[in-house]
C-alpha cells in the first residue's frame, strides 16, 4: 500500500465511515486536501505548547507551498509585521484589519502569525493560495472548507468567492 494511503488510514482510523471508489477521471486533484508527508526533526520541542505550535505550523501549510516561503513573505508583509508587533507589545490600534480577531492571533517562535490553528497568509501569497485551492474545480463550498482548515486572511471569504 502506498505511504500516502497509509498516512490517510492512520489519520482517519478514529472515524466510522464507508469508502466509495471514484474513478480517477471523475476525481480531479485537489492540493489542499492531500495529506502532507511529515518531515523528521532532530530537535524535539521542549514542552507541550511548543509541540502543539510546531504541529499546527507543519500541518497548516497548503501542500503546494513551502513554510519557508510563507515565512519570508510574512517578514516582508508590512500589515502582518505591524500585527506581530502589536501582539508582542499588547497595544492595538482599531485601524488594524486584524483588530477584530486580535484575541485569536499568536506568533510562533520563528515569527509565523497564526489565527488559532490557521496560518495568516501574507498578501503576496493569497492569490497563489486561491489558485491552488481552485485546482480541480471542487466547487466554492469545498474550496472554502479546504482553505478554512489551513489558512486565513481578512476577507478570505470574499476573495475565494470572487476568484
Image (cartoon, rainbow, N blue to C red):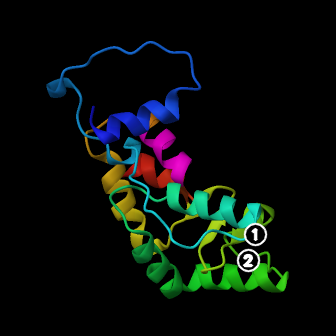
The residue nearer to you, when weighing 79 against 31, is: 31
- Can residue 152 be found in the magenta stretch? no
Q: Name the residue beneath numbered marker 1.
A: 99
Is there a contact, CB below 8 Å, between mark 2 and mark 1? yes
34 displayed left or right of 72: left
Q: How far across and down, in percent of the image, does residue 16 sit?
A: 56, 16
In the orientation shown, which residue stands out farthest toward the right?
90
- Looking at the rendered image, the quarter that the N terminus falls into is top left
- Can residue 149 be found in the magenta stretch? yes
**Rendered view: 113 above or below 25:** below
The residue nearer to you, when weighing 115 against 134, is: 115
In the orientation shown, which residue stands out farthest toward the front?
42
* Mark closer to the observer (2, 1): 1
Quarter of the image holding residue 15?
top right
Magenta region: 143-150
x 42%, y 56%: residue: 62
Q: Name the residue beneath numbered marker 2.
A: 95
Quarter of the image holding residue 138?
top left
Main secondary structure found in the magenta portion: helix
x 37%, y 55%: residue: 63
Amino acid at each position: 500500500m502506498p505511504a500516502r494511503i497509509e498516512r490517510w488510514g492512520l489519520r482517519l482510523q478514529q472515524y466510522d465511515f464507508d469508502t466509495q471508489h471514484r474513478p480517477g477521471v471523475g476525481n480531479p486533484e485537489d492540493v489542499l486536501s492531500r495529506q502532507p508527508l511529515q518531515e523528521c526533526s532532530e530537535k524535539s520541542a521542549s514542552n507541550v505548547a511548543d509541540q502543539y505550535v510546531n504541529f499546527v505550523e507543519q500541518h497548516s501549510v497548503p501542500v503546494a507551498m513551502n513554510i519557508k516561503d510563507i515565512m519570508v513573505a510574512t517578514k516582508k508583509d508590512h500589515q502582518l509585521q505591524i500585527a506581530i508587533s502589536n501582539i508582542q507589545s499588547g497595544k492595538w490600534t482599531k485601524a488594524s484589519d486584524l483588530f477584530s480577531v486580535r484575541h485569536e492571533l499568536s506568533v510562533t517562535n520563528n515569527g509565523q502569525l497564526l489565527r488559532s490553528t490557521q496560518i495568516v497568509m501574507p498578501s503576496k501569497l493569497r492569490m497563489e493560495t486561491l489558485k491552488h485551492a481552485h485546482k480541480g474545480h471542487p466547487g466554492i463550498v469545498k474550496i472554502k472548507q479546504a482553505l478554512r482548515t489551513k489558512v486565513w486572511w481578512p476577507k478570505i471569504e470574499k476573495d475565494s468567492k470572487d476568484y
